[in-house]
Structure formats: structure tokens, C-alpha cells
């Protein structure tokens, strides 16, 4: 046993601030309320249901993760957030149509009490939306200061000891890193000049990081993944995670692809298409927002298959991703994957996957887990990119000198070994020779 890291206790209330109170956010909030009341189980949440093996297999030590590390209890979470629409989270959850009205009515009072704070929003970055609950300010710095005031007022009102912010807002248009994102000084000048290269999501991320608050990006936008934000996070001691939650088709991709590669099965083509009818689908119907999503979705296979190491198997892989907005399906997305694979002596085979999923049902436990683990990271004094949380993201943030890890099973090992390391337990290597020597 090594010395455990010093971790401040999870005492008092944890404020979870969600930017964008749409399908994902309201499913997370209603879910936590329902679980607190024992109306449902936290299925899909590693922090609530997962266990962690400690020591040798013969020791039979596998505590629950939330008993092994000190995480905020669900009873101690207070939710808040911003949206461009004025409806409370009960009404927003009814609009999103993910959860049954019967369940929502049982948590109605708590949901109605959460009303969105007015948003920082500019239609330039999300073309298909517009709403009335929007802040006015003389420039983007002024808007960031208003968000900081909101954060402080929320913390005081709800007597929170700690806060976490997660962007659960719409996917913004595709943007590339530019000069204004290089340093904190350039970024702050850019805020004062309302530089167009600073989308709304960055204004929130800046406000959170300036306050030393952990920040996660559940969407694929270029938000906190720029040097200026990383420098700011280092200065204020804020942990960061992102980008774009790994749910639905990409989750399945990162489960199947490592298996094919492990057995040296070649892949010639991977065609993925989705139909989706919720507001997210509507936003992604705009080519500029879709481009952001497409880039995030496409990167996983390249990194998992490592075509530079296995050119015979993966060099000419044709990877196509499509999302079509189809209103009748609402949040119940349907995805099809056709995978053209190659076996022994080059013989072709095909694999077809038809996933009838519920997007926000897969996303909610991830929002919860990321918030709880980021709060743990903050209390453990870990700041900057939390690569061990790659497990939750489609396009994981990573240090510039390493490639991102996309393989779900390596990601899980990294996550659990980080927890073991934090608690001074031996890391698990799976060598296991001692049982046979
Ligand atoms: N559902 C999933 O499984 C999943 C998976 C990965 C990523 N995502 C991403 O998560 C995000 C949320 O998805 P959703 O299904 O909840 O979408 P949604 O459209 O239901 O909710 C997004 C909310 O964000 C609000 N919003 C947009 N810009 C805002 C701003 N600047 N400030 C405050 N609020 C703002 C919108 O009004 C809307 O209510 C999307 O970017 C989506 O791509 C979702």
C-alpha cells in the first residue's frame, strides 16, 4: 500500500451547473431526483453501480467505487443552469419528451423549482435556435462577468461548498483554434473586443475556470480545449474534461472496434447512419454544427485501429458518418452500422448493427459521473486535463504530445487505476503470474 493522496472530504452541498437545460440535462436532473426517492436505479452510472477490484484476485476485495473514494452523495447535489428558453426544468423535460410523464410528475415540485438563468447566446454559433432568455452586455467580457455573478449568487443561495459546470448546450458551429485562443491575455483582450472567434460556450468555460470551478464539455464544440483555457485552469487549479459524451453509436464503435483489432480482423469500411428527431437532431441538421459533430465522431476509429502500425488491416478504411433529422423519432435515435471486415486469407465478411437507442438515457449517467469525478479531482488537487475521464468522451482531451486513447477498455483501466493510485492501492497490471509460480 502506498501513501494515499490528500483528498479534501466531500462535505456540504455540491452545486452542479448545467449550461443548456435540454434533453440531456433534464434527464440527468430528473434521474437524480427519482433515484434519491428510490423510484428508479442509476443504471449506466459507474460512480453509483460500479465496483473496483483491489489487491489480488484471491483477496476478494471489490468495494463499490462510491464506497472506495469519497464522492459527493446524490442527496448533496443541487442543480442549476442556464438556457435561452424560460421554461423550468419540469416543462423542459416534458418538451424534450425523453422521460414518461408518470415519472416526471413524481419529481415535478423539485424540477419546477429549477428555473434557467438567462443565457449567453448568439445565433451566429447555433443557427437553428433562438430564444428570449438571453443576457445583454456591452461586450463578451461583460457577459462573462455576468455569468461569474450568477455562479457566485447560486453558490451563496444554495450554500454550496463546491461547484462543477458542464456544458450540456447545443452543438455550436465548427471552429478552429486561432490567435485569440493562444494565451489568457489574448483571450481576455478578445472578450473585451467581442472577438467572433469566442463562441458562447467559451464565455461560460472562461467564467467557470476563472472561478477555479471544474468544467466538462459534453458537446463537441471547441470550448475549453485551447491553450488559453488550459493556462487559466492551471492558474486557478481547475480540472477539465471533454469533449462530446460517448453515447449511442460511438459507444458501440469503441466497444466493437477494439475487439476486431485484438483478433487482427481487418476492416475495409465502416458506414454509420442515424435518424434522430430531438432538438439536438434539429441543430445538427445545420451543416456547420454537423461538421463539429462529424469531426468528433470520426476520430475514434483511426486511433483505435492504428493504421500506421497495421497498414494491411486498416490503411484504406472508408469511414462514413451520417446524421439525419427525422422528427417522428424524437430522442429515440436509431443507428445503423455496416462494417465490411476481412478475415484469414483476405476473405470478406460483414457485420450489421442496428441500435435502437435512447440518446439522453445513455448520456445522463455520464453527465452525473463526470460531475462527481471532476469534483473528486478538484478535492484531490488535480487540475488541467483529466485524461482518466476519457472513458466518457468521444473526442477525449489529451496532452499535445500524446494521441487520445479511444479504446473503452483501456480507458476504463486508466480510470480505475487512477482511483487506486489516489487511494494508495496497488495498480492492477493483470500480469497474474503469482497464482501459478
Ligand atoms: N444525447 C446524447 O446522447 C448526446 C451525446 C453526446 C453529446 N451530446 C451533446 O449534448 C448537447 C445537448 O444535447 P441535448 O440532446 O440535450 O440537446 P437539446 O437541444 O435538447 O438541449 C440543448 C439545450 O441547450 C440550450 N442552449 C443552446 N445554446 C445555449 C447557450 N449558449 N446557453 C444556454 N443554453 C443554450 C438549448 O436551448 C437547449 O435547451 C448537444 O450538443 C449534443 O450534441 C448529446
Image (cartoon, helix red, strand yellow):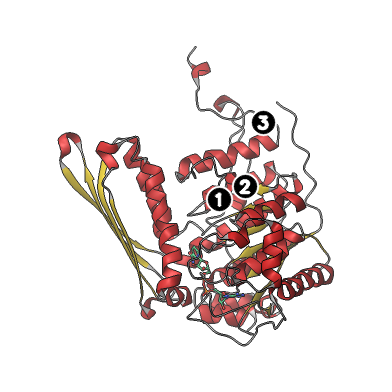
Image mark count: 3
Residue 195 location, quadrant? bottom right
Q: Quadrant of the N terminus?
A: top right
Residue name at image x 46 percent, y 64 percent: 292
Residue 163 in sight from this viewpoint: no
- Mark 2: few, some, or many residues within 10 Å (few <14, many ≥20)? many
- Foreground: 187 or 402? 187
**Residue 218 to residue 300: above or below:** below
Residue 410, horizontal then vertical, whole percent: 49, 39
Determine contact: label 3, label 1, CB under 8 Å: no
Element class at badge 2: loop
Q: Earlier in the sequence, mark 2 or mark 1?
A: 2
Which residue carries the number 2 mark? Answer: 386
Residue 305, horizontal then vertical, whole percent: 36, 42
Residue 105 location, quadrant? bottom right
Left-right relation of 267 to 113: left
Q: Which mark is residue 345?
A: none
Residue 110, horizontal then vertical, whole percent: 69, 75
- Mark 1: few, some, or many residues within 10 Å (few <14, many ≥20)? many
Left-right relation of 279 to 308: right
Could you give the CA–CA distance between mark 2 and mark 3, rounded to whole angstroms?
20 Å
Q: Earlier in the sequence, mark 2 or mark 3?
A: 2
Amino acid at each position: 500500500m502506498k501513501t494515499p493522496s490528500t483528498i479534501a472530504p466531500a462535505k456540504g452541498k455540491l452545486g452542479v451547473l448545467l449550461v443548456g437545460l435540454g434533453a440531456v440535462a433534464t434527464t440527468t436532473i430528473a434521474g437524480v431526483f427519482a433515484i434519491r426517492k428510490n423510484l428508479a436505479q442509476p443504471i449506466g452510472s459507474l460512480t453509483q453501480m460500479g465496483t473496483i477490484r483491489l489487491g489480488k484476485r484471491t483477496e476478494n476485495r471489490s468495494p463499490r467505487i462510491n464506497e472506495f473514494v469519497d464522492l459527493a452523495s446524490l442527496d448533496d447535489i443541487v442543480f442549476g443552469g442556464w438556457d435561452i428558453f424560460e421554461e423550468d426544468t419540469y416543462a423542459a423535460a416534458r418538451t424534450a419528451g425523453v422521460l414518461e410523464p408518470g415519472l416526471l410528475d413524481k419529481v415535478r415540485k423539485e424540477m419546477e423549482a429549477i428555473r434557467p438563468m438567462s443565457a449567453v447566446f448568439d445565433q451566429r454559433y447555433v443557427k437553428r435556435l433562438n430564444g428570449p432568455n438571453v443576457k445583454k452586455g456591452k461586450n463578451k467580457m461583460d457577459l462573462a462577468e455576468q455569468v461569474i455573478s450568477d455562479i457566485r449568487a447560486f453558490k451563496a443561495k444554495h450554500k454550496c461548498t463546491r461547484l462543477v459546470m458542464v456544458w450540456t448546450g447545443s452543438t455550436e458551429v465548427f471552429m478552429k483554434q486561432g490567435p485569440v485562443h493562444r494565451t489568457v491575455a489574448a483571450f481576455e483582450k478578445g472578450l473585451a473586443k467581442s472577438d467572433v472567434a469566442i463562441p458562447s460556450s467559451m464565455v461560460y468555460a472562461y467564467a467557470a475556470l476563472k472561478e477555479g470551478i471544474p468544467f466538462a464539455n459534453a458537446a463537441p464544440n471547441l470550448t475549453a480545449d485551447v491553450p488559453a483555457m488550459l493556462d487559466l485552469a492551471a492558474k486557478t487549479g481547475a480540472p477539465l474534461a471533454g469533449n462530446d459524451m460517448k453515447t449511442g453509436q460511438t459507444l458501440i464503435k469503441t466497444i466493437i472496434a477494439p475487439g476486431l483489432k485484438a483478433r487482427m480482423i481487418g476492416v475495409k469500411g465502416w458506414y454509420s447512419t442515424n435518424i434522430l428527431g430531438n432538438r439536438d437532431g434539429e441543430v445538427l441538421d445545420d451543416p456547420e454544427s454537423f461538421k463539429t459533430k462529424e469531426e468528433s465522431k470520426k476520430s475514434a476509429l483511426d486511433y483505435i485501429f492504428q493504421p500506421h502500425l497495421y497498414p494491411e488491416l486498416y490503411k484504406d478504411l472508408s469511414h462514413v458518418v451520417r446524421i439525419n433529422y427525422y422528427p417522428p423519432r424524437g430522442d429515440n435515435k436509431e443507428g445503423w452500422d455496416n462494417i465490411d471486415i476481412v478475415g484469414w486469407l483476405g476473405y470478406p465478411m460483414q457485420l450489421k448493427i442496428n441500435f435502437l437507442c435512447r440518446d439522453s438515457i445513455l448520456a445522463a449517467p455520464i453527465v452525473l459521473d463526470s460531475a462527481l469525478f471532476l469534483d473528486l479531482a478538484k478535492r484531490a488537487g488535480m487540475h488541467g486535463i483529466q485524461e482518466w475521464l476519457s472513458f466518457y468522451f468521444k473526442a477525449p482531451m489529451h496532452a499535445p504530445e500524446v494521441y487520445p486513447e479511444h479504446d473503452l477498455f483501456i480507458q476504463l483501466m486508466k480510470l480505475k487505476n487512477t482511483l487506486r493510485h489516489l487511494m494508495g492501492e496497488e495498480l492492477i497490471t493483470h500480469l497474474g503470474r503469482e497464482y501459478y509460480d
